[in-house]
Image (spheres, rainbow, N blue to C red):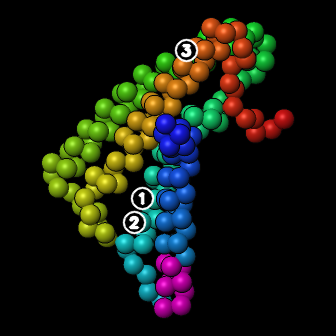
Amino acid sequence: MDTLRLIDRNAERWMLLVFYVMLVITMAIEVLRREVFSYSSIWGEEVVRYAFIYLAWIGASAAVKDRAHIRIDVIMHYLGRRMKALLYMLGDIVMFAVAIVALYWSLETVHVSLNFGSVTAGLRVSQAWALMAVPLGFALMMWRLIQSFIRDFKALRDGTDVYEGDTLFD
């Protein structure tokens, strides 16, 4: 059970680390190749592009988990615990509905790519690998939204302060 908690707590961090390291190393190699050897490859640009796309979608899930996404929360300072929890729960429900629609259509895109056998220009791997970043991101977001809803429901039930995440500026 401790292993599952560890994965739950750090899954996005580990995935972000993998894609970030992949991006930085590939970009460094490509810059070196371009500047020293006057040669660059198309695969390097593709690896960096797709790593960045995965970083963005996994990062969106991490932001949902930590309530670190951009929001205007001025009104929240004037609300009581109960109303705050209810508004956060409403926001989670709305975002979950959006995520369901987005997950469906992003999986449809992956399905079409698989049916037609499209491949990337440089790496010559299935385009579905690149397109899977979007459904992966939305699936992770949905999981984190469920967790957030449960956390907010417990705060509402117990009358405790709702989790608001860390603030960027104080």
Evaluate whether residue 96 shows in this view: yes
Across and down, in percent, residue 121 comes to 29, 67
Residues tagged 2 and 1 counted as in contact (Cβ below 8 A)? yes
Residue named by callout 2: 46
- Give whichever of discs 3 and 1 has the lower sequence position: 1
Question: Which of label 2 and label 3 is nearer to you?
Answer: 3
Please rate how many residues cluster around mark 2, counting C-alpha atoms within 10 Å: few if below 14, some from 14 to 19, many from 20: some
- Please state which of residues 12 and 97 is positioned toward the viewer in this rendering: 12
For disc 3, the marked residue is 90
Amino acid at the residue labelled 2: Glu
Q: Residue 87, position in %: x, y?
A: 62, 14
Check disc 1 and give the amino acid type.
Tyr
Q: Is residue 65 left or right of residue 125?
A: right
* Residue 111: quadrant of the picture: top left
Residue 71 vs 37, above or below: the answer is above
Please say if the residues under marks 3 and 1 sit with CB atoms less than 8 Å apart: no
Q: Residue furthest bottom?
A: 37
User: Residue 36 lies in magenta, yes or no?
Assistant: yes
Q: Is residue 2 magenta?
A: no
Q: Which sits earlier in the primary sequence, circle 2 or circle 3?
A: 2
Number of numbered callouts drawn: 3
Picture disc at residue 50: 1
Q: Could you tell me which residue is drawn at 57 percent across and 40 percent down?
A: 9
Q: Amino acid at mark 3?
A: Leu
- Write the start and end of the magenta stretch as one range: 29-37
Q: Residue at x 21, y 57 (%)?
A: 118
- Viewer-proximal residue among 123 and 150: 150
Please provide percent x and percent y for residue 61: 52, 39
At mark 3, the secondary structure is helix
Question: Which element is circle 1 on?
Answer: helix
Crowding near pointer 3: few (<14 within 10 Å), some, many (20+)? Answer: few
Whole-angstrom CA distance, mark 2 to mark 3, is 39 Å
